[in-house]
Image (spheres, coloured by chain):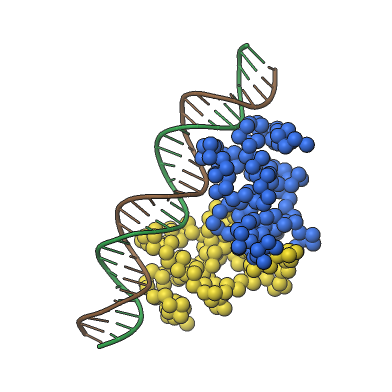
Chain colours: A blue, B yellow, C brown, D green
Amino acid sequence: MDLEIKFTDLLRDRNLKATPKRLELLTVIANYNSAIPYSELQKKLKHFDRVTLYRTLNALLDSGIIHKASVSTDDTYYAMCKEYCTTECHNHKHVHFKCVECLEVSCVDTTNTIQIQIPNVKIQQVDIEVSGVCEKCI
Amino acid sequence: MDLEIKFTDLLRDRNLKATPKRLELLTVIANYNSAIPYSELQKKLKHFDRVTLYRTLNALLDSGIIHKASVSTDDTYYAMCKEYCTTECHNHKHVHFKCVECLEVSCVDTTNTIQIQIPNVKIQQVDIEVSGVCEKCI
DNA sequence: AAATTAAACGCAACATAGTTGCGTTTGTTT
DNA sequence: AAACAAACGCAACTATGTTGCGTTTAATTT
């Protein structure tokens, strides 16, 4: 299926206008093989106004089309959400992994659900950020 | 045991001078009942130069006296390390929990070790950030 | 106890990140 | 084709974090 048409539908579903900039941003994120760092988005989208890039990212974040993978503090990483994410509920059954060698960040689906319990606390969300050395860099 | 003396020893152990500012910063962090947000440090230490606050925090982070608890993206939180942390090895067997109601961030020791495995990957560090509602706010 | 020295500090300046207001442009609807 | 709300670009602003450098101070040595 044509990505442009798919993204157009995706945006309109969430009551967002399917503008050329949004389609371009989504294409860049989707075509990147892992979670894309903000600095990379800046490089690839130099013709975007700074403010436009921020506002576009925030619009996509708010509507559950993309999500942040904030592994470590240096850069912010963005990746596409799965199909079942909505504005209200992000449902990511995965952890974020960052390779300390190539600095690549990827979303790893977890097969067996990770169970975390804290006494007397109602847990709503669990973010797991893993770092180490990836297959290619070992 | 007197905190001042304890902190003086702690700093000298790590080859850091036990200056009044460092002792004051450590006292503020240690006396806070949970992980203290950066904005709170600024408020309590208005007489610190901005640069001094950053450099002092970084010195303490580098030497493993305090650690960051970067739950969510709004503020950065700092907390004392356990005794067994060194410059080389931070050994935190705990998760960071943030209450979405009172915004308090605390370090929760985990009794049973959390096992995470990713195929073909050498895992070095796992950071777990949990958010939800704490005992007081339920 | 005074001198020495390397670290710590304060200030100025800079770089980047992120936000807000407002006038203009554009996607979508009628 | 017209109308309208959303999206965009620009300017300006705030917050965050860093670097260089001259001055001060903690720790060491004499």
C22 or B16: which is nearer to us? Answer: B16
C8 horizontally vs B127: left or right: left
Q: Quadrant of the C terminus of chain B?
A: bottom right
A7 horizontally vs D26: left or right: right
B40 or D29: which is nearer to us? Answer: D29
On the image, the x and y values in percent for residue A48 come to 54, 37
In the rendered view, would you say B30 is above or below B46? below
At 67% from the left edge and 55% from the top edge, which residue is drawn?
A106
At 61% from the left edge and 55% from the top edge, which residue is drawn?
A70
B97 horizontally vs B35: left or right: right
At 65% from the left edge and 44% from the top edge, which residue is drawn?
A29
On the image, the x and y values in percent for residue C27 come to 64, 27
Residue A137 falls in which quadrant of the image?
Answer: bottom right
Report if residue A131 is visible in the image. yes
A85 or D22: which is nearer to us? Answer: D22
Residue A10 falls in which quadrant of the image?
Answer: top right
User: Which residue extends farthest right?
Assistant: A112
B52 or D22: which is nearer to us? Answer: D22
On the image, the x and y values in percent for residue B137 come to 64, 57
In the rendered view, would you say B85 is above or below A133? below
On the image, the x and y values in percent for residue A21 come to 61, 34
Report if residue A60 is visible in the image. no
